[in-house]
Image (cartoon, coloured by chain):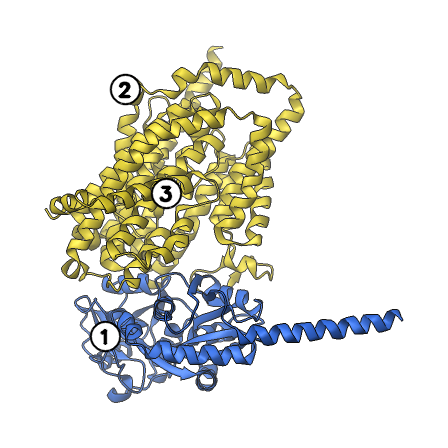
Chain colours: A yellow, B blue
Amino acid sequence: MEIFPALLSVVTDPVLLLAILLAAVVGMIVGATPGLTASAAIAMLLPITFYMPPLFALAFLYVIGKSGRYGGSIAAILFNTPGTAASAATQLDGYPLARLGKAGKAMKVATISSIIGDFMGDIMLVIGVGFIAALALKLGPPETFAIYFAAFVVIGSVIGKSILKGLASALIGILVAMVGLDPISGEERYTFGSFELSNGIGLVPLMIGVFVLGEVFAQFEERRKTANPTEDDTREVESNKSFDDGNSLTWQEYKPCLPHALRGGLIGAGIGVLPGLGSAIAAFISYGEGKRRAKNPEQWGKGALEGVAAPEAANNAVSGPSMAPLLTLGIPGSTIGAILLGVFLIHGIQVGPTLFLTDKELVYKLFACGIFGIAAYGLIGYFGATQVARLILKIPTQVLYPLIFLTTFVAAYSARGSLFDVTVMTFAGFGGWLMRKYDFNVAAFVISFVLAKGAEETFRQSMLMSDGGALIFIERPIALAFLLVGLAAMAFRIRGIMKDRKLASGGLEDA
Amino acid sequence: MKRRSFFAGLVAAATVTAVATGSLAADWPRRPINLVVPYKAGGGTDAYARAISAAAEGVLDVPVVVVNKPGSGGLNGANAVVRAKPDGYTMMMTSGGSFLLSTMMRETKIDALESFDFVAQVGQLKTSIMVPKDSPFQSVQDVIDAAKAKPGSLRWAHSGRGGFHFVAGLGFLAKNDIEAQDVPFKGGGPTRAALIGAQADFGFLGVQQLAGFEEQLRALAVNSKDRDEIMAAVPSFGELGVPFAAVSSPVIVFAPKGTPSEIVTKLETALEKITAKPEFAELLVKRGTGPVYQTGSDAKTGLTTMKADAEPLIAGLGK
């Protein structure tokens, strides 16, 4: 086990430990600030790392990536703003919890679950790096498409009450994802002659618009309608009153979250192996699967602690295993991965299957730094983030919402420095507000947007590879297995719905 | 009266601008130079930009900052730079072949030869035909024979339609009178992984992509007349006598049109010095590439020739 000497050498290097600590703090701040993302921070800090030794540079950026993913949950819970794409699933239950005055509790659950997930991912990386790389190679386009299919079905369980409106939302998401360049032919689709649209619709501005701006609009409308100034005061009083129990977390409360965190960790680690799926998808799958198996599914989406634990564990668990295809095959699984790849190259380290022969020590030391990084952000987060929550919740809504309103514009612009993204965000905001108003499913919309691109690309690649059309999915055992998983989940769900219907109609007859 | 003062103002403004531009060129560079790379960090062109940035110390008094503006097959970054202030502080470094081909194949106002000033060429990316290590194909001839035996049965991977790897692959197929189905992947890294995993029978990817992956892949030939200087173990189409299309990708630094010629010349000289530094070559050799310096006008001539070569191939695509 090469990891133990590596851990030892890191622990005896106070300067390196300080760098890790600093990285954990920086990552948390940028992750928690809507509009600053860990990948943007890494890109900005990249030039500084030229002057650092390779291990310092890599460890610094790697830990920022980890703690930034965690930090995203803070913004998701407090402001309903996904600080990172990965935390979009967290806000589904995190924000309702915050509105119930349980932001601190939600943040503690997020912290513990992130640590659990991250550790599971890292352990899997350390033990199975070679195996993961070999596995990733076996997954060609047909296998990846089958995984997308299964993911789609599993995530489908977040589609709410109305199946028809849920499906419609998903279809709109797919349609919006089609804007831009055709992934195979490179031709423009639905761009209406606009150069900016040929780049496609960005995920970050879309998400900020739909989730945050849409929510702000909905709040404006609500307030106009009720026109009741005391409502705000009651919220404050309520939150203050419940603060003592809203902030602390007992073992009894976390106990039901644990299985969700563990399952989320496994899902995230599994997704991490597959380059390109990314932590947002892992978080949504974990949320969907968690809700499906939960004892209290009706609570999910209204403020269930389990609904925070499941996605948070999953999105952090992606971090470790995604390093395996990056280091051994040179395929980055995320933006952060792509930038890390750049750092290796800048420092003249050749990433590839020979990396473990040429720079084994460095790689294991990097893994060790990652483990210390988890501990650092975990401790700061558990004890620090709740203080932040206490502060933020003191801000009255008439100040908070305008602030959030402004942040959305900054956030949309700063992600890529593009004014076009601000336009996209504004349109998405109106879209999100209308979807909420008419009970369409915003989450289903965003998830299908995320999945559609990859699914389309891999499906069409498979078709080009195949001599017998769709038969390629059946001829390849791994692809077939995932397709069956998806079909089984679908059948299971249909049966569940039928049962519910029968119960409902039976209930009516009784009445 | 009014009109006269208006003209006087105009003349004064013009004079001030001229003086300002003059002094602008004289004490250039005074602040960091932004080098826009229209691809993601970690790619082949990006590696050149990073190496320039690292080796610029001592030659240029100011840092060279690499800015990645990916999207639209490299046109996104080009669009940003073409509109940038021509003050010598925003430049673009791009893979000249892919840039040229994408401006030819896509609807855009940008003309690779006319919309920018050519500063200098600093490197050269060449594509090559590769197969997975356990592939039955030992030589280019094996691939051609197999394709002739069963037309259209082979699959080949590349990093995206419109790039120079794709056009080189098409040229190879057309000139050898064979057919095969292409499977596009997104970028060089995923293409290499797909080929290692034997998702396709062969692939066209940068010869430098072999560095570090010699145990997983076999490069059958590099797409040029002569061997590559760095990846010298790989034979060339030229020496094998296999017909091919002469598409490669010179890595070129472009300046927005209208940049003062003194600045362009200064940067051209600086790039010559930087590319001659041993550190520059050292940074690149690990990635399987090396410095190839050419003046701006030579780079433009090279790209003009390539345009003439590529035109019939692109016309053959049926667009």
Q: Which mark is residue B219?
A: 1
- Residue drawn at the location 76% of the way across and 72% of the way down: B10
Q: Residue furthest right?
A: B1
Which is more foreground, mark 3 or mark 1?
3
- Looking at the image, is mark 2 or mark 1 nearer the viewer? 2
Tell me the kind of residue under disc 2.
Trp
Gap between marks 2 and 3 measured at Cα? 28 Å
User: Relative to A371, is A349 above or below?
Assistant: below
* Residue A62: x %, y % from top left: 30, 48
Nearer-N-terminus badge (2/3): 3
Three-letter code, disc 1: Ala
Instruction: Give, as a three-letter code, the residue at label 3.
Output: Gly
Element marked by disc 3: helix
Q: Quadrant of the N terminus of chain B?
A: bottom right
Q: Residue at x 30, y 45 (%)?
A: A63
SS assignment at label 1: strand
Q: Which residue is mark 3?
A: A27
Q: Nearer the viewer, mark 2 or mark 3?
A: 3
Q: Residue at x 35, y 65 (%)?
A: B43
Identify the disc placed on residue A251: 2
